């Protein structure tokens, strides 16, 4: 770990300004991912801006009947919130499927969206990685890929986004609210928040330098059955091989997104028209452009079967 | 332990210790957090320095050069000890691969340097400044790919056994099973990482470490350091998990001893968690073939168990077939092991060596047969294949697993 300076931000605007002024600055909230990466010198911020004290830890009803979740709301508190459990059960279930109790106590809503991939090659500084060291090459392609992405990848990167929460947020059409370094507010639909790797896999979101997430809002509740089903190599404390987040209505229509398969939560709205035809047709439409490796092509079938289990659970 | 005698003569059957409510000496200390693990020993009169190891970035080849100039100038750094500077050290008797010293890299994360500093954080930060040039060589890492080149290991490992005529009995059995099972490489990750403190007093060194076998450890450390065994004192009152992974000398003890000698102060070294899988011993992967022949009444007539595993040159096989020699009736039996050369970290004992992967393979057909015949009530310890196997139409041909 390299030496760094540290400040506590006094306001949202001051935090965004401080981050814009220093190219090597990073925000720190729960630190559950950033500190690990700093110890390995994969993240090398020379300055940390602590945003924990900014009062962004509240969950409030929004004026349109939706829910505004402060950026600093801990995963544990969000999962346990009465309104979330009643109206957005999918989100609560996705949260408790991730990490461990201790990590969820520290991890924040915005931090969860911004966490880095767990691709093993990203974490091993002895191996080239375009995400860690742009232009150095991708060790995962041709390497051990069981855990890695099957769709939306590129010649430069086949990493996945590791979040469970974000997959649920994608189904719920969440909107990320930010403040830019010039004080301007921005509202980013979650569909546009995470990027595909392309030839710049080190750029993972559409945030600008210094842009600071203040909250994530959910539209008014949409009813239906809320299901999050996660398949992993270990029953707990493991990342998804495949996860399905779904809201299914009594008439069989609904929404669905897949985790563990791409550089972002994977949702194809047009595929949802196939839901009444069943899991096979829907999964085929969701993963039509998949380019899996020999080692992870099982994720295609696993997605279909996991979705099948979700749809039959929805009918119960 | 083989239970070949009636109860009361085997030590466990005598129930002198097993089954008695005996106070475990370290139990209370460990569960209440008061046991001192190797890295935690602290004498206020001593000025400990902290060592942080650097592991090889290649899996096989040579270290060409090590540039440690920037690390030596980093804040708090007291010294950098590199594998090139210390040169060739003698390998301990129990180790398959050298732990430190010289150019040759035998496996990934083999220690190539240790940085010593006033604080742990300074040592870790400075380690990242070391630049190592390697000449990598092509290695073999995939057991499946090396299966054809695997050889029968040293006779001292008792690689083969035969009783009766397996081939003939299997050929005429009414029900047969022929199945392959594989197990992956598995790594120790005990709660207490391998860790050591070394302090020299003249030409004698005291090492606080976490060792399951004091004398093996002490002997090999003396060999590696080139000192008499009587000059090495080993302290290991508590072990925070060993399971075979702390049976003999590991790199942390060597690095701590060399670093402490070099800077003239006691030095603490713990293996960082990411280095543990490749800097210690592990349970090698296996590929196993099980063949069982039985009569329709469930009586086993033939068992064969073969296993392939890999290790560095000079290493041994994962003894996955041993239990098949002891368990179950069956007049005609054959077991065999083959050993491939793999450039992975050394294989060695890990919690029930041989038995854990081997019994999994031997017992799995029973589970499969039971599942395929829901009416069966026999326990998994049954030594007969249930009668309702008759329902399976593939009798006389291999049952697909």
Image: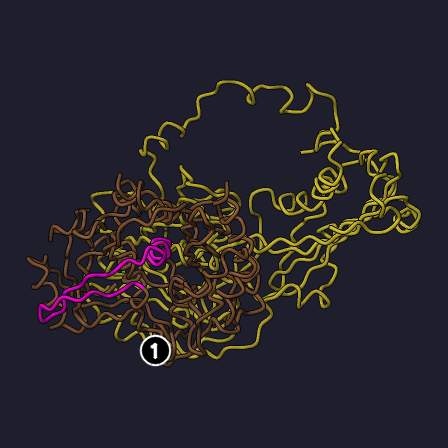
Chain colours: A brown, B yellow
* Rendering quarter of residue B363: top right
| Residue displayed at 64% across by 63% down | B143
Inspect the magenta stretch and tell me whether residue A70 lies in it: no
The one nearer the camera, B246 or B87, is B246
Residues in magenta? Answer: A163-190
Position of residue B257 measured from the top left corner of the image (x, y, whole percent): 37, 56
Which residue is label 1 attached to?
Answer: A200
Relative to B304, say whether B114 is above or below. below
Give the left or right position of residue A226, taking residue B137 as reference: left
| Residue displayed at 75% across by 59% down | B152
| Residue displayed at 49% across by 51% down | A231
Question: Do we see residue B161 in this rendering?
Answer: no
How many numbered tags mark residues here? 1
Position of residue B260 measured from the top left corner of the image (x, y, whole percent): 31, 57
Relative to A269, say whether B399 is above or below. above
Q: Which residue is farthest front?
A: A251
Q: Chain of mark 1?
A: A
Position of residue B298 measured from the top left corner of the image (x, y, whole percent): 84, 35
* Other-residue count near label 1 (Cα within 10 Å), few / some / many at <14 / 14–19 / ≥20: some
The one nearer the camera, B74 or A236, is A236
Position of residue A225 measured from the top left corner of the image (x, y, whole percent): 41, 45
SS at circle 1: loop
Question: Do we see residue B137 in this rendering?
Answer: yes
* Rendering quarter of residue B377: top right
């Amino acid at each position: 770990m390299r030496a760094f300076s540290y400040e506590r931000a006094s306001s949202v605007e001051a935090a965004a300004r401080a981050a814009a002024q220093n190219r090597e600055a990073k925000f720190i909230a729960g630190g559950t991912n950033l500190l690990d990466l700093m110890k390995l010198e994969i993240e090398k911020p020379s300055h940390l801006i602590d945003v924990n004290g900014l009062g962004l830890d509240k969950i409030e009803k929004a004026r349109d009947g939706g829910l505004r979740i402060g950026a600093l709301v801990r995963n544990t508190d969000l999962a346990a919130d009465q309104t979330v459990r009643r109206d957005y059960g999918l989100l609560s279930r996705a949260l408790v499927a991730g990490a461990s109790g201790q990590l969820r106590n520290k991890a924040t809503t915005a931090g969860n969206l911004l966490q880095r991939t767990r691709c093993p090659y990203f974490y091993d500084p002895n191996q080239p990685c375009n995400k860690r060291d742009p232009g150095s090459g991708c060790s995962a392609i041709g390497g051990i890929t069981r855990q890695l992405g099957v769709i939306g990848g590129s010649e430069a990167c086949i990493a996945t986004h590791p979040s469970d929460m974000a997959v649920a947020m994608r189904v719920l059409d969440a909107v990320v609210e930010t403040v830019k370094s010039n004080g301007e507010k921005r509202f980013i639909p979650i569909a546009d928040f995470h990027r595909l790797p392309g030839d710049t896999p080190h750029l993972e979101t559409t945030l600008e330098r210094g842009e600071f997430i203040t909250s994530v809002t959910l539209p008014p509740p949409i009813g239906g059955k809320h299901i999050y089903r996660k398949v992993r190599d270990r029953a707990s404390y493991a990342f998804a091989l495949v996860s399905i987040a779904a809201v299914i209505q009594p008439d069989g229509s609904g929404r669905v997104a897949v985790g563990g398969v791409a550089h972002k939560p994977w949702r194809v709205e047009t595929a949802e028209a196939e839901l009444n035809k069943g899991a096979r047709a829907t999964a085929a439409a969701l993963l039509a452009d998949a380019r899996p490796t020999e080692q992870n092509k099982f994720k295609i079938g696993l997605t279909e079967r996991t979705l099948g289990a979700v749809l039959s659970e929805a009918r119960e | 332990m083989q239970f070949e005698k009636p109860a009361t003569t085997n030590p466990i059957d005598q129930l002198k210790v097993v089954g008695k409510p005996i106070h475990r000496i370290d139990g209370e200390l460990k569960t209440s957090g008061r046991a001192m693990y190797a890295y935690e020993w602290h004498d206020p009169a001593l000025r400990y320095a902290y060592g942080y190891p650097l592991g090889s970035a290649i899996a096989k080849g040579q270290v060409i050069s090590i540039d440690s100039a920037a690390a030596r100038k980093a804040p708090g750094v007291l010294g950098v000890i590199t594998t090139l500077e210390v040169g060739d050290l003698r390998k301990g008797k129990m180790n398959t691969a050298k732990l430190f010293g010289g150019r040759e890299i035998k496996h990934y994360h083999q220690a190539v340097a240790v940085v010593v500093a006033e604080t742990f954080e300074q040592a870790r930060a400075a380690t990242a400044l070391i630049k190592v040039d390697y000449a990598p060589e092509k290695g073999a890492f995939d057991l499946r790919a090396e299966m054809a080149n695997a050889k029968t290991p040293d006779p001292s490992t008792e690689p083969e056994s035969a009783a009766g005529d397996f081939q003939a009995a299997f050929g005429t059995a009414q029900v047969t099973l022929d199945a392959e099972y594989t197990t992956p490489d598995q790594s120790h990750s005990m709660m207490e990482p391998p860790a050591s403190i070394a302090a020299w007093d003249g030409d004698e060194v005291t090492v606080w470490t976490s060792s399951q076998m004091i004398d093996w450890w002490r002997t090999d450390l003396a060999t590696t350091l080139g000192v008499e065994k009587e000059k090495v004192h080993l302290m290991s009152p508590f072990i925070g998990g060993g399971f075979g992974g702390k049976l003999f000398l590991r790199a942390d003890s060597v690095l701590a001893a060399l670093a402490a000698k070099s800077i003239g102060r006691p030095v603490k070294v713990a293996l960082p968690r990411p280095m543990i899988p490749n800097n210690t011993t592990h349970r090698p992967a296996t590929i196993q073939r099980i063949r069982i022949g039985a009569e329709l009444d469930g009586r086993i007539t033939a068992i064969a168990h073969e296993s392939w595993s890999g290790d560095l040159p000079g290493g041994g096989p994962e003894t996955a077939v041993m239990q098949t020699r002891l368990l179950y009736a069956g007049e005609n039996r054959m077991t065999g092991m083959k050993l491939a050369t793999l450039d992975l970290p050394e294989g060695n004992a890990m919690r029930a060596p041989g038995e854990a992967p081997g019994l999994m393979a031997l017992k799995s057909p029973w589970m499969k047969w039971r599942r395929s015949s829901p009416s069966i009530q026999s326990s998994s310890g049954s030594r007969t294949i249930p009668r309702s196997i008759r329902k399976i139409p593939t009798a006389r041909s291999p049952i697909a697993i």
